[in-house]
Image (tube, rainbow, N blue to C red):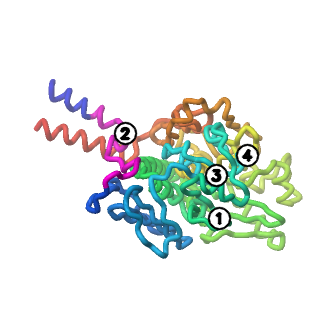
Amino acid sequence: MLGLNFITSAIALASMPMWVSAQTQNPQSCVTTYNGNTDYFPVKANHTDTSVFTITYNNNYKTLTDVKNNLTYVLYMCGTPAPVNPNAAAIISIPVTHVGTEDTASLTFLEMLGVRQTIKYTTDPGFITSPCIRKLNIPQFSSTPTDAEMSNVNVTFSWRTPNVNSTKIVRFPATSSTTSLQRYQWIHFLGAFFNKEDRANTVAATIADDYNCIKQKAATAAATSLSQPATVFANYYSGTWTLGSAYTRAYVSDAGGNAAPANTTAAQTFDYSTQSAFITLLQNTSNIVYTGDITLDAFYTNLNISSLTATSTNNTYPWKVNGALWNMNRVTNNLASANSWFEQAVAWENVVLADLVKVIQPTALVGYSRVFLRDLDANEEQLKLNPSTDCSTDDLSKVLVAPAVCAGQKVAWNGDGTGTGPGNAAPGMPSGRALAITLSAVAAAILLLA
C-alpha cells in the first residue's frame, strides 16, 4: 500500500507544471561587492536559434546581437565594471527598471515577463489593446522623443531606426521574422534586459511546446480527413493585392492546409493587369484571411469582380460557398482603434496557429474558440477590451499568463488566467515537455520501490 501511495503521489506531483518550479534567479538588484570570478547570471537563456539574434554570457555582462540589423548590445550587471566594446550600439546597465516602447510589438512580451509597470513611456494608447497597460495611463512618447523623455528611461524598444541620437534605443524587430516559431523567441531578448531569463525560459517553453502539440493535432486531422484546404493570406492597398508570404505560408502548412499561391515561398503580388491569374487562384482557395481592417462591402469592392458581391451566390469560389472569409480583428480595444493581431499575436504564435487550425482543420481542436480570426462573412461580434472592466487594480501587478491551448489554459487579457472572451481551449494531451516529466517521475518512483 505504501508503494502504491508513493507512485500515486509521484504521478500527482508530475502532473503539475514542474518546468516552472523554483530555480535560481538572476540578480534583481545591483551588486554591492564585486568579485570578478563570480558568475552573476547563473540562469542562461534557453535560446538556440541564432538566425534571429544571439545571446552570449560572460561573468558580469551579456552580449546580444540582432542578426537582421547587425546591431550589438552589451548588458552589464549594475555594480560591476562596464565592459568596453567600441562596436556596440549601446552598453546598458541591468537589470533595467524604467523602459519605453515605441510600438505595440513588445508589450505582450513585457507583460508575460511580469515587468508591465516598468513601462514609463509608450506609443499612442489608441494603438494598444492590452487593458492593463492602458489602465496604467502611461505617457506617450513625442513623435521625436525628447531629451527629458529619454532621461527617464534606461532603454527604449523600437521597431524603427532611431530618429534621435541616443544610446538608449534598442531595435526590436520581432515582426520581421520570416517563418513560424521565431517571433515568440524574442522574449529571451527582452528577458535579458531584466535578468528575467528564468521567466523567459518558462514562457518560451510553454509557447513552443503548445505550438508543436497543436501542429501535431492538425496533422492528425488532415491525415484523417484526407484534406488540406488551400488557404491564402491577403491584403489590398492602392489597387494591388498582396497574397501570401513566407511567414504566413509556414503557418498554413503547420495548420494542416495548403498555402496559396502554390509552389513558392515568396509573397505573390497581383494587380489588375494580372487579374485573370488572381481570379484563378481565388477559384481554387478554400479560406481567405484578410490581414487588414476592412468591411465586407469594401472587400468585395476591392476584388472588383462583377459576379462577386457580399450578397451574391457564386459556386465558383469555394471560400464564398463555405463562408470562409476571415479577418484578424476579433479582439480590439474599446475604442475600436487597435486590434490584438499587432500586439498579442506577435508573441502568442501558438494561439495564431490554433485559430488557423480551427478554420482549416476544425475537428482537430474541439471546444476551442478563435481568438484573433473573425468571421467577416457573418459580421461576427468583436471582443472590445476595456481597461475599466477588463483589468482591475489588482490585475496590474499580475504576470500575464502565456496561454497553452493543448493543456486547456484559457487566453487571459488581464493576467489572471481566467479568460474574458474567445480562446477558451478544450483540454488536451500535455505538451511533450510536461509528458516527459510525468513519465520520468513515474519511472523514478518505480525505481525507488524496486
Above or below — where is 329 with respect to 143? above
Q: Which mark is residue 146?
A: none
From mark 1 to mark 3, how far is it between C-alphas? Answer: 12 Å
Check disc 3 and report the residue beneath it: 104
Q: Position of residue 43 (x, y in %)?
A: 34, 53
Horizontal side of residue 286 vs 237, given as left or right: left
* Corner quadrant of residue 430: top left
Q: What's the magenta bit mostly, secondary-structure-wise?
A: loop
Seen at 62% across and 47% down, the residue is 359
Horizontal side of residue 54 vs 392, given as left or right: left
Check disc 4 and report the residue beneath it: 126
Give the residue at the far bottom of this rendering.
86
Seen at 54% across and 52% down, the residue is 349
* Corner quadrant of residue 94: bottom left
Tell whether position 22 is magenta: yes
Seen at 83% across and 69% down, the residue is 272
**Kind of residue indicated by mark 1:** Arg
Segment tinted magenta in the rendering: 11-33
Locate the C terminus by quadrant. top left
User: Front-most of 365 and 391?
Assistant: 391
Are the residues tagged 3 and 2 within 8 Å (C-beta)? Answer: no
Locate the N terminus by quadrant. top left
From where the camera sits, is residue 411 visible? Answer: yes
**Kind of residue indicated by mark 3:** Thr
Above or below — where is 315 with respect to 240? above
Seen at 24% across and 39% down, the residue is 442
Regarding mark 1 in the picture, which secondary structure is present there?
loop
